[in-house]
Image: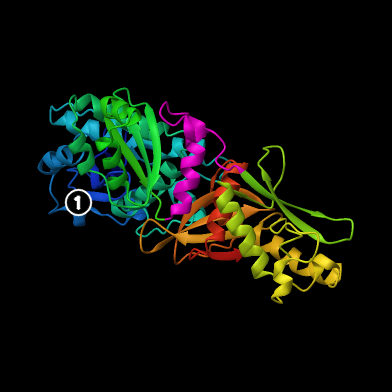
Amino acid sequence: MYAIVDIETTGGKYNEEGITEIAIYRFDGHEVVDQFISLVNPEREIQPFVVNLTGINNKMLRDAPKFYEVAKRIVEITQDCIIVAHNASFDYRILQMEFKRLGFEYKRKSLCTVELSKKLIPEMESYKLGKLVRALGIPMSDRHRASGDALATVKLFQLLLDKDSEKDIIQQAVKTEIKKKVATRLLDILENLPSATGVYYMHNNKGEIIYIGKSKNIKKRVNQHFTGTNNKSKKIQKQVAAVTFERTGSELVALLKESQEIKLKKPIYNRAQRRTIFQYGMTSHTDEFGYINFRLEKADGRKKYITTFTNISQAKHVMFKLTEEFGLCQKLNELYATKKHCFQYTIKECQGACIKEETPESYNKRALQAIEKYSYSNKDMLIIDRGRHHDERSAILIENGEYKGYGFYSLNYQITNREVLKTIITPMQNNRDVQHIIQSHLRRKNKFKIITL
């Protein structure tokens, strides 16, 4: 659990400032679950430059509560939380100073979104909050007021969680929470999981990730692990201390995240998924008569395929479908063994390439159309799918036929801007497994929107 904080102060000498406004959003890593926003009477004058910057003046604060009147609420809303702020050393110092004046020691762990941004989004022109969120396409209102700045920091922090492929932030948070919950029961873990699409991470009592999975219904899938009777399920039940998750909205994004993070983190109970997930590939070659032929073969990681398949039955199904859709020849595609014409020619569904009646030029036009549809080689495009919320969409970026990564964007933002794309996209590895995942999903005619760049 995180407490996203922003504080406005009177300005003045170091450790003599007073709080004029405070905003705290209690954030579970997915959504805001509580909030506290209040003006505060600092019992001292505000520096003129601060009045000009924030618009908060002494008259506005005359009837505002003093810090001791809001202190209890601040303690409660930040209980068991990691303090997150943009330039956290400042906000955390101010809070500690105000509590010290009351004779109370205030201690919390803290995270700074300036430091995290420099690590996870390098080469930005500026890391000042206003300029940074504008460059990232994050909407912002009430700049230099606590609630506006804190809410922008919430959205920035969510983006940083998405970009943290090493899962350092979340593992540290889990480690902190586990110490406070010595005996976490499986039912307690399940209670806090959503029935939503995303990726889930099972942690042991040291916070380490022992299993990564994806599901259209996270709660239901984790419950299957907890009630399973096979050896792996029993081992997981014995060792799991916490389950964290990330909503993706899109099943395709969930599959891509799961694939990369298993390879990256190598969890002890994901051994099977570390191996290549496709077994067959489709290739093409031009025969001695000039016709393009398609062939299915056992997958070889060194070869480049038009598209790949999990098993032979799926491969044959797609090959028959492709042959029918583009009016191709079953004999040339090695689906009908014969020395004469293919069966499709008999029923007028093949134009006679098998017996050289159709010219190679005419036939190959359709064969190339099939390759174009079933492969995204050399293409620049965005695959648009569901987001985590109703006003959000996910975007998967393909450049020159290579998977570059994914990101989420607000529906009222122009996604085709290349500069904005570079900032919102979380870079991911391009490999044959992710290409297989993307091609498999595109073949299924899911409700994706494809934007050609």
Question: Which of the 4 image quadrants contains residue 95?
Answer: top left
Per the image, is 202 magenta? no
Instruction: Give the quarter of the image for residue 291.
Output: bottom right
Provide residue 172's location: percent of width, then percent of height: 35, 29
- Kind of residue at disc 1: Ser
* Viewer-closest of 358 and 440: 358
Where is residue 268 shown, x and y percent of the image? 42, 26
Q: Is residue 20 above or below residue 208?
A: below
> Does the magenta stretch mainly form a helix, a strand or a loop?
helix
Q: Which residues are magenta?
A: 250-279
In this view of the protein, which residue sits in the foreground, 413 or 130? 413
At mark 1, the secondary structure is strand
Q: Position of residue 440 (x, y in %)?
A: 55, 54
From the top left corner, tell me how far across and down residue 214 is, in percent. 40, 44
Left or right of 123 in this view: 107: left
Q: Among all residues in the image, which is located at the extreme bottom?
A: 348
Q: Residues within 10 Å of mark 1 (few under 14, many from 20)?
A: some
Classify residue 405 as left or right of residue 303: left
Residue found at x 66% / y 53% = 399
Say whether residue 269 is magenta: yes
The vertical placement of 100 against 344, above or below, is above
- The answer to whether residue 251 is visible is yes
Residue position marked by numbered label 1 in the rendering: 38
